Amino acid sequence: MNDLEAMQIAISAADRARLISRPNPWVGSVVVTSTGKTFDGSTSRVGGPHAEVQALASAGADAAGATIYTTLEPCDHTGRTGPCSQAIIDAGIKRVVVGIVDPDEKVSGRGIARLREAGITVEVGVLADEISSQLAAYIHHRKTKRPFVVLKMAMTLDGRTAAPDGTSMWITGDIARKRVQVLRAQSDAVLVGANTVRMDDPQLTVRDVDGDSPRRIVLGEVSPQARVNPCTQWNGSLVDLLDELGRQDVLQLLVEGGPTVAAAFHREKLINQYILHLAPAITGGNDSLPVFEGHGIATMSELWRGKFKSSEQLGDDLEIVLESNSQLQETHK
């Protein structure tokens, strides 16, 4: 088994931790012995073993003289658990292959340095781009102290999000709506505007998929009887909100608001990823609500441009994922 194949196993293991490890990063690890045996592990819930410790425990005595692959640099400090670097040393591992360096200031190179000081061979950078994408929300939070902001909008083929009377259920089909449930489960908080609560009375909980429901945030004030309760009602600036959520270890914020909320985040350049669900439907006029409400650019030189990250067929609908150029540069540093 080569390094790329082994690291791919670690990446798959990390996917298992995506919904349970936050606010810790979702990390995967695999021990590969000289005879080709593999033992993988992933990050547990907060307070439980990290991925490397899980993999080492599975390997037991077979870990001596083996290589361990880990998507993120092993920690070298004691928090809720002991340092993974010491566990690797104690297990007799001879070689460590790391996907990316941990941007957390408590780690950031210390784990790698500790392993090398112990005489262990350490290599860094295997499948780094793929791992950076997998850990985008964690990396962004550690570098900016703010949550990674994902805007999700459902729209018709002619770019409309609701009828003139404000109704918007349902533009997309069942499969696309289930995808939204997954996005909620992957997020620490979900946000809408008070007008969306008044029009649709959403619960904003996770349904029909595994995962915990995110914290609910409403811009503005809502009735105590609204189904979104209990929620945080926010009337301050969006920047202050993101700063506060970052301090509270919110790694990813899912914005599901209407065109006014979407436009507010977009104009302040606060969106890291745009997820657009495009339905094979047409409103046929300009009196329905657009994706972004209010004034746009004044001239083409001000046009916002990003990069297509992915596209996927979701039943009859199409999911398009966009990222800003600045986000791509920051994530892959």
Image (cartoon, rainbow, N blue to C red):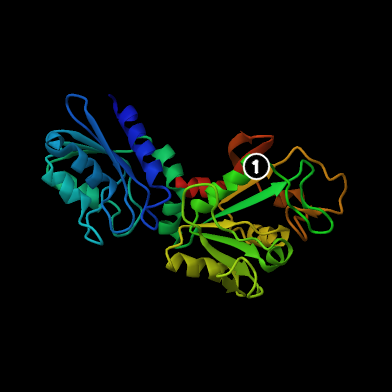
State the residue at coordinates (14%, 45%): 89
State the residue at coordinates (48%, 58%): 188
State the residue at coordinates (29%, 25%): 2
State the residue at coordinates (45%, 58%): 251
Q: Is residue 221 above or below residue 34?
A: below
Q: Can residue 44 be seen in this view?
A: yes
For residue 178, which quarter of the picture? top right
Q: In this view, does 28 lie above or below 249?
A: above
Name which residue type carries label 1.
Asp
- Relative to 240, 22 lies left or right: left
Structural crowding at the residue carrying mark 1, measured as other residues with C-alpha within 10 Å and reported as few (<14), some (14–19) or many (≥20): few
Q: Disc 1 on helix, strand or loop?
A: helix
What x and y, as percent, mark residue 22?
A: 40, 56
Q: In this view, does 16 lie above or below 148?
A: above
For residue 94, which quarter of the picture? top left
Quarter of the picture containing the N terminus is: top left
The residue pinned by badge 1 equals: 174
Q: How many labels does the image show?
A: 1
- Relative to 270, 131 lies left or right: left
What x and y, as percent, mark residue 238?
A: 59, 67
- Relative to 177, 80 lies left or right: left
What x and y, as percent, mark residue 201?
A: 68, 63
Q: Can residue 114 be seen in this view?
A: no
For residue 271, which quarter of the picture? bottom right
What x and y, as percent, mark residue 78?
A: 21, 60
